[in-house]
Image (tube, grey):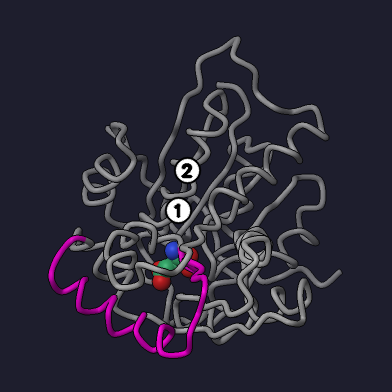
Amino acid sequence: MRNPIGMFDSGLGGLTVAGELLRQLPNESIIYFADTAHVPYGERPLAEIEEFALGITQFLIEQGAKAVVMACNMSSAAALSSARETFPDIPILGVIGPGSRAAVGSGAKSIGVLATTGTVKSGAYSRIIKELNPDCEVLEQPCPPFVPLVEAGLAESEEAEVAVRSCVEPLLANGIQAVVLGCTHYPFLRPAIARTAPNVQIIDPAEETVRELHNILEERGITAHNDEAAEHIFYASGDMDGFARLGSSFLGKDINHVRHAQWGVDLMPRAKSRI
Ligand code: DGL
């Protein structure tokens, strides 16, 4: 197998980024890690997420990843800078920087962000968007029910419709012009979000993330070309069957073989290095 792009998330959400990678860079192989032993991440402290993210990044690099995409907003908020310090030789991307650049690039001045509690608490979207354009107003809305609904395969249920309305309406009341899907699980709820907010631009950071990844691969001369077939490998730390079943339908590709990677055996939570 050629050197893959490592990607990870707490569960199914990062597949929205993997799907975009397959679309934009079909020659790249992917090694995907779903931390289903710890999903949902949303209410956990950022320091704990940082330890998970550093442990997973190390695991992916040990498996041969030539670049790592944190296909998870909480990990991006908690661990991007420490992962870059800890593993300086491998390009590591998060989704919050690209998502913020896409939001500012949309031209909207009043931007809503739907995210998990942890990502909202980190304030990362507000900080980065305002650094890019101090005239933008940013409103961040935590959406605790969304990830459990997606992981349960209920993204298209009435329950999801109601949860989406209750989280999106406060942003609409504040006159937002664009809304960032600030958790990689949320693109699975995009139809319900679009029904609730039909006149608002919906920004999925995945597209810009993969565009920026492509630029980095090109700069380093490590883009895969079409001389070998791409191969994709999936790992899960907890539930594997649910991940394979729902993941296959979300990705539109058979995830027929999910490997088990066990915390404490195959990978370790890792405190940040003190450089
Ligand atoms: N999909 C992840 C994110 O983008 C984590 C969601 C969760 O497990 O709460 O933040």
Q: Position of residue 192 (x, y in %)?
A: 27, 65
Quarter-wise, where is residue 150 in the image? bottom left
Q: Is residue 246 above or below residue 80?
A: above
Residue 165 on the magenta span: yes
Q: Is mark 1 within 8 Å of ligand 1?
A: yes
* Residue drawn at x 21%, y 71% as measured from the top left: 160
Picture coordinates of residue 9 (x, y %)? 47, 57
Q: Are marks 2 and 1 in contact (CB under 8 Å)?
A: yes
Report helix, strand or loop for mark 1. loop
Q: Residue at x 77, y 31 (%)?
A: 218
Q: What crowding class fits label 1: few (fewer than 14 Cα within 10 Å), some (14-19), or many (20 or more)? A: many
Q: Residue at x 73, y 79 (%)?
A: 130
Give residue 110's position: percent from left, percent from top.
58, 80
Q: Foreground residue, 7 or 193? A: 193
Question: Magenta region: which residues?
Answer: 156-183
Residue 66 position (above or below residue 266): above
Q: What residue did someone put label 2 on?
A: 18
In this rendered view, identify the residue nearer to me: 75 or 226.
226
- Name the residue that disc number 1 marks: 14
Q: Quadrant of the N terminus?
A: top right
Looking at this rendering, what residue extends furthest in the front direction?
A: 199
**Residue 156, placed above or below residue 78:** above
Q: Quadrant of the C terminus?
A: bottom right
Residue at 56 percent of width and 48 percent of height: 207
Mark 2 and ligand 1: say if the CB distance to the nearest ligand atom is below 8 Å.
no
Amino acid on which disc 1 is placed: Gly
- When the figure is inspected, residue 161 is found, relative to residue 66, above or below; the finding is below
Amino acid marked by disc 2: Ala
